[in-house]
Structure formats: structure tokens, C-alpha cells
Amino acid sequence: MKQSKGRAIPQQPAHTTPRRAHIPAGGVALTDGRRLSFSHTATLRMPGALPCHAAWWTCDDGLKVCASLDSTQHGRLLHVSLSYPDRDPTWEDIKAVRYAFYPSNVDVAMMLPADGFYVNVHPFCFHMWQVPVTWGIR
């Protein structure tokens, strides 16, 4: 506890402290030893959303990763997608990308949206989103 003018102030709970995820610059080393090579950047413009900066990486085994900082009602949150051209990423792929793009103290979610909101632009693509601290899930 901290002291302020003679009274104790409780420490801020860990789940409410600001945590930041960002888009890496250049190549990215995955936790399993593979390396993602930087490909390109672009500005994404989705209907009804603010434009956002995105970057893409590729791996020698065909893995492709895209990261963007999406504007949300909770602030800018990191959104990362990963795919192969002809198969789903494995759980090991998902974990390797998660820990390469998000700090270990940031909660990350993979969601299955309601039927009316589901968009399948690529059949083998998985998405991860930074969980807002304000959700207070831990």
C-alpha cells in the first residue's frame, strides 16, 4: 500500500494496469525458432470503422501473419491474424505467434462471432484480439 497524506491507498489491481501491445518493426522471431520476414504495410479501410495501419509478415513454411491496431470503444487494440494457404494453423503456430506479437502480461482472445457477424475472407485464417483491460476478466 502507498501512503498519501496519512492514509493508505491500495495498489492498483494488476488486471487494471495499462498494458500495451504494438505492431513490431521488421522481422519477427517466433518462440519456436522460426522467423517471420516483413512483407509490407498498408492502411485498412473497413466499412463503418476508422482506417487502421496494418503490417504483414511471411514465413518460409507458408505461414502468413497480419497485425493491425484497431480503433475500438476501449482504445486502440492489437488484432493479429495468421493463416496458411491450404490448412489451418496448428495450436503450436497460434501460441508462437501470440507470444511473438503480444507481451506476456496482455490477455489475448480468439472469438467465434454470432452468425450475422461472421466474416470468412480466407478459409484457413485465425484471428487474435488484445483483450481490453476494462473488461476486467482477471
Image (cartoon, rainbow, N blue to C red):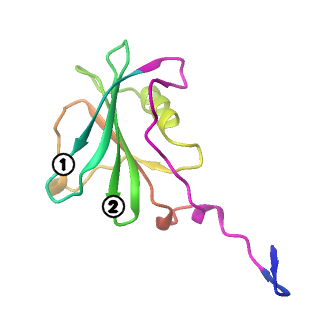
Quadrant for the N terminus in the image: bottom right
> Sequence-wise, which precedes: disc 1 or disc 2?
1
Q: Is residue 137 above or below residue 66?
A: below
- The answer to which image quadrant residue 79 occupies is top left
Specify the farthest residue to the right. 6
Residues rendered magenta in the picture: 9-36
x, y percentage for residue 40? 30, 28
Mark number displayed over residue 72: 2
Looking at the image, which residue is at 43% across and 32% down? 94
Name the foreground residue: 44 vs 83.
44
Residue receiving disc 1: 45
Mark number displayed over residue 117: none
x, y percentage for residue 11? 73, 70
Q: Is residue 11 magenta-colored?
A: yes
63 to the left or right of 96: left
SS assignment at label 1: loop
x, y percentage for residue 35? 47, 18
Looking at the image, which residue is at 17% across and 46% down? 119
Question: What's under tag 2, amino acid-wise?
Answer: Thr
Question: What's under tag 1, amino acid-wise?
Answer: Arg
User: How busy is the neighbourhood of tag 1: few (under 14 within 10 Å), some, or many (20 plus)?
Assistant: few
